[in-house]
Amino acid sequence: MGTSANLNYFYETKREFLRFFVPLTLLIFLGFMALLWFGHNQDLKIRLVEERHHVNLFKSSIYRDLESLSSDVFVMADSDHLKNFLTDDTPETYQNILKRFSSFSEDRKVYDQIRLLNESGMEQARVNYHSGKSSIVPREDLQNKGSRYYFKESIVLNEHELFFSPLDLNVEHEKIESPIKPMIRVATPVFDSENTKRGVLILNYLARTMLDRLDTLVTAEERHEYSMVNKDGYWVDNPDSDKEWGFMYDREMTFGKSYPHAWREIQGSKSGQFSSKEGVFTYERINPTLSFMPYDSKMDPIPFLRTETWTIISHLDDDEVSFNVFDEEHMEDWALFLILILTITVISWRLGHERQIRRQTERNLFLSKEEAEGANKAKSEFLSTMSHDLRTPLNAIMGFSDMMRAKTFGPLGDHHYEQYVDDIHNSGSLLISLINDVLDLSKIEAGKYELVDEHLDISLIINSSFRQLKNMAETYNQSLNSDVPYDMPCLLGDERAMIQMLNNLISNAIKFTPDGGKVDFIAKVDEDNNIVLGVMDSGIGMSDEGIAKALKPFEQADGTHSRRHVGTGLGLHICVNLMKLFGGTLDIESEIEIGTTVILRFPPDRTVNPS
């Protein structure tokens, strides 16, 4: 074959190659970009839900601390030891009150100082706490605090009224103490046995205990997103410690100066999530007044309680929320895309080359008719398969793209498009739920699931589950009820595991309870000091065989009834394994068409009896 013929053959092959390569590459590129875009939007929605969840976790944690702080100051103010001392200051009553202050300080371990001041602000008794030990300040070393703002604010209050100081740093002898001690002072007036006001009781709370707990609720990589500011926008908690406590050091480093547009938005409401040119912000206002009320209470804050507010803020900057196809997280996607393009290049060149070979064969009659027909048949089958495999996913992408581009149902924002988004969100949420169940089960069975024990208030835990599942129950006109005794002791356990178990059990009860039914939650302490929790429903019930099946992984007892919800069938199995980690048991009592009761029984060493 001469030079001219070779060049002609090459150009003909190249033309055939481009005929396949260009349209296939264009379609795949458009599909790839669409998938990246939808994936980014789905990931962003999940991320924003996580931000709201974390901020609410922070808020709940702080309210639990404030609730305990409020309770402590009232317990101390109403104690007989204190009233006896205020009524009759004798060496015996003085020693009694000092012993009471010392034991309380060493028991709680969170109060830097416990002080009793008289009507003029002079300290009458004071106990300091340091390195696990309390120390009594001699009477000759006591100081007059009558000029301090916290005394002036609290001495004018009535009985059982509180003053919460701003969150600031402890000052001793007119200097900020080093190392710094974030401090909240809570004070209430005290009265003798004749109900005469005799001064104020002040507890100096080591707020670092509260602030450091925020670090345990998120990973180290996520910590940079979260901070807390006071009512004037000064940081009281920030991953960059140099930005904290600007109002104490006369540094004008505030959230408002760093993010002026966001600060104006945050000041306008108590909570929310919004996007601006400065990024995405999620925030919750903290008002110590609300530590006296349930978190979902619609009551206004108590008017007589003097305090300030703080705001927990999550900030995602533009780099974290913007769509960038060249982000590091998309590198694997691009690698797969390039491999696909390389494959298409090889296939397209091969197709062009084969077509040229066929034409050359036909022209030169180098091959027999049977061989030409065989080659043509193989080529046709290959093209048919290739075309089908590519069109099947691409038709869906192009169909939705054309509808949105042509605005078939109207401009963007039409409820049809919103339904598409809802479907994508719901499908993604289900997929995440299924994956999380499988991962949790794998971690438990591998022995790598570790409980993080803390004192859990059963009422708060069940209220959290009810809030999360309220909409689900209302959809089917079902009622959620709880019966938790007011004196129910705390449970020593892992909050995340407890919420996961209760959510699984209550959502199962809702799923298999007919419309108009009810789901009840009970809590009690049995004769062996075991905390017993129960979830009861008026649903379809299960047979003994159904119970055994429901307890197995990936099995579901509901095989004959139409099911409202899909799932992995892992919920009960995960609960059983979590109860084993707690050292407790899970029992099921059920009767067909009557209902089901699931009982969680925790060992007595997890019952935290009040001291």
Image (cartoon, rainbow, N blue to C red):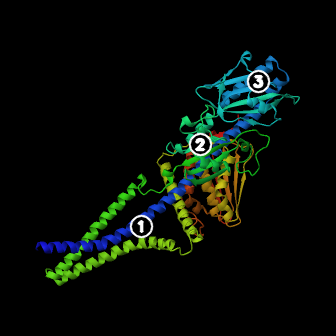
Could you classify mark 3 by the number of other residues whose Cα lies within 10 Å: few (under 14), some (14-19), or many (20 or more)? many
Q: Where does label 3 land, which residue? A: 97
Q: CA distance from mark 3 to mark 1?
A: 76 Å
Nearer-N-terminus badge (2/1): 1
Comparing labels 3 and 1, the label whose residue is closer to the camera: 1
Contact (Cβ within 8 Å) of mark 2 with mark 1 = no
Name the amino acid, label 2. Lys
209 versus 9 height, above or below: above
Tell me the distance, in whole angstroms, between the alpha carbons under discs 3 and 2.
48 Å
Location of residue 567 (image quadrant): bottom right
Residue 29, x across and y down, in percent: 38, 66
Q: Which quadrant is home to the N terminus?
A: bottom left
Helix, strand or loop for disc 3 = helix
Q: Amino acid at mark 3?
A: Ile
Q: Amino acid at mark 1?
A: Gly
Residue 203 position, x and y percent, is: 71, 30
Question: Which residue is situated farthest in the right direction here?
Answer: 194
Q: Residue at x 66, y 43 (%)?
A: 530
Q: Is residue 149 above or below residue 142?
A: below
Residue situated furthest top in the rendering? 140
To which residue does mark 2 refer?
A: 257
Depth order, front residue of 413/213: 413
- Numbered label attached to residue 31: 1
SS class, disc 2: helix
Which is more N-terminal, label 1 or label 3? 1
- Please give left or right for residue 450 compared with residue 62 in the image: left
